[in-house]
Amino acid sequence: MGSVMEKINLKLDNLNEVFPDNFTDEQIAKAKTAFLKKLSESTHKFYGGKIQTAPKAGVFGFNWFNVWYTPGVSKVSTTIRDDNDTSFDLSNRGNLVGVVSDSTRVLGDGDCTPPGGLGVMEGKAFLMKYLGGVDAVPLCIDSTNEKGEKDADKIIDFVKMVQSSFGAINLEDISQPNCYKVLDTLREECDIPVWHDDAQGTACVTLAGLINALKLAKKDIADVKIAMLGAGAANTTIARFIITAGGNPKNIIMCDSKGGLHKNREDIKNDKAFYRKWELCEATNPKCIETFPEACKNADVLIALSKPGPDTVKPEWISSMADKSIVFTCANPVPEIYPYAAKKAGAFITATGRGDFPNQVNNSLGFPGILKGALMVRAKKVTDNMAIAAAKSLAQYAEERGINTENIVPTMDEVGVFSQEAADVAMQAIEDGVARVKLTREEAFKIASEGIDYSRSMTKTLMNNDFIKEPPQELLQEALEYAIKQVQ
């Protein structure tokens, strides 16, 4: 075991090489999952979480305390009182996002209780800052009403009450059907953008990946047959975006846990809370296909955001698909089928939501740039057009630097993608008439680039000066040993 431990490095860029040589592909996939989970737990404990509050203004002498607080700050308060929009200039509001969740649908783990979502919401804040130059605050709330039910109206009321402190709200990990009502209500009734990352963010990046995958397969989005497993907030929004981007709804078959969505699904029609699903029942699957295996036959594309695998999607379903099939299995933390198994079954291109496999189709590519773009022009909302503009921006960025079957979308360490995405989103906001501030694309790109460079440089400075310490090597070794034991 000692020789195995010596192979691990701090960058974690050699995970496929650190496990015993006799491990199969399946064992390596399981071991990586166990390793990342264990290391995440131990390093979160080591750092005490992963975000903090830090000043952006200096203390150059004693009287600067009186500038930043009383009596000087009184002038800031009265200026904002007389014109609330000046709060975007005189406070951090213009670059601040509230990450709001009731933690009822956390990754693949379900209801984790309100504080159980803090790790994910801190993660959102971490990525917004490092990737998009945007500050964010986790706000995990209890949405339980007096009847003991999870109440969408409580989330709606909370966001309305706190919106004056933020430039945008990122909704996260809210279970359906509440997620539909919360987003659709707040988008219309708030003066700032309210964005549901599990729905719009996932849909945006999935569409970006699909655009480039179809280019490589030499297929047209208007012609392909698409089988979709899972009918939650993510997949229903993906379907809507695909249709808006030119997909034919009659070629889409979506299945939930009870079967295919179609015009005869009275259970969905009669439950008004699931109105988004009913819209798809009316628009898609005209032949009323009932099962997912049947939906997969001769399908060009499979998109699954359902139950974590690895055997939720069967290899034989993929084998029944059309030539040069595209398979996106994006359940977290374990995809519905591992990429190596999907490839073995005949898939031409595979993608998951994880960064330790090729083609990470994950909303982390979307929300930092999209929210930065919305904030820069002080948008009143994030329109579907803005999200689709971001998808096209991501696809274009990847295509211009080169795509192949193992590399269809940018990765999070490609710095330039987020500035380009933010600028394209800002331009779409102006075109859609939801921007309070007008910028040229060059101005937007410059502002975004400077903000992102500032955030990355600040983090690197803290690391270089040991304010952010390296995690002890023992934590990596313990996680690796734990992972190997879990699989052996």
Image (cartoon, helix red, strand yellow):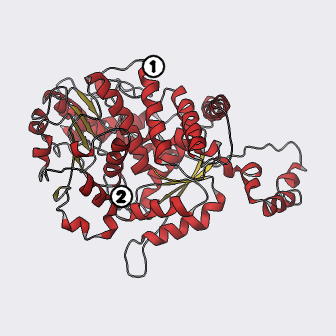
Q: Which residue is mark 1?
A: 400
Query: Mark number for residue 105?
Result: 2
> In which quadrant is the N terminus drawn?
top left
The residue under the point 35% across, 39% down is 36
With respect to residue 349, does 263 lie above or below? below
> In which quadrant is the C terminus drawn?
top left
Under mark 1, the amino acid is: Glu
In the rendered image, which quarter is residue 482 located in?
A: top left
Query: Mark number for residue 384?
Result: none
In the rendered image, which quarter is residue 322 located in?
A: top left
The residue under the point 87% across, 58% down is 75
In the rendered image, which quarter is residue 310 located in?
A: top left
The residue under the point 52% across, 34% down is 421
Residue 192 lies left or right of residue 254; in this view the side is right
Residue 457 lies left or right of residue 15; in this view the side is right
Structural crowding at the residue carrying mark 1, measured as other residues with C-alpha within 10 Å and reported as few (<14), some (14–19) or many (≥20): few
Residue 263 lies left or right of residue 131; in this view the side is left
Residue 316 lies left or right of residue 466; in this view the side is left
Structural crowding at the residue carrying mark 2, measured as other residues with C-alpha within 10 Å and reported as few (<14), some (14–19) or many (≥20): many
Q: Are marks 2 and 1 in contact (CB under 8 Å)?
A: no
Q: Position of residue 17 (x, y in %)?
A: 29, 23
Which of the pair 103/304 is nearer the observer? 304
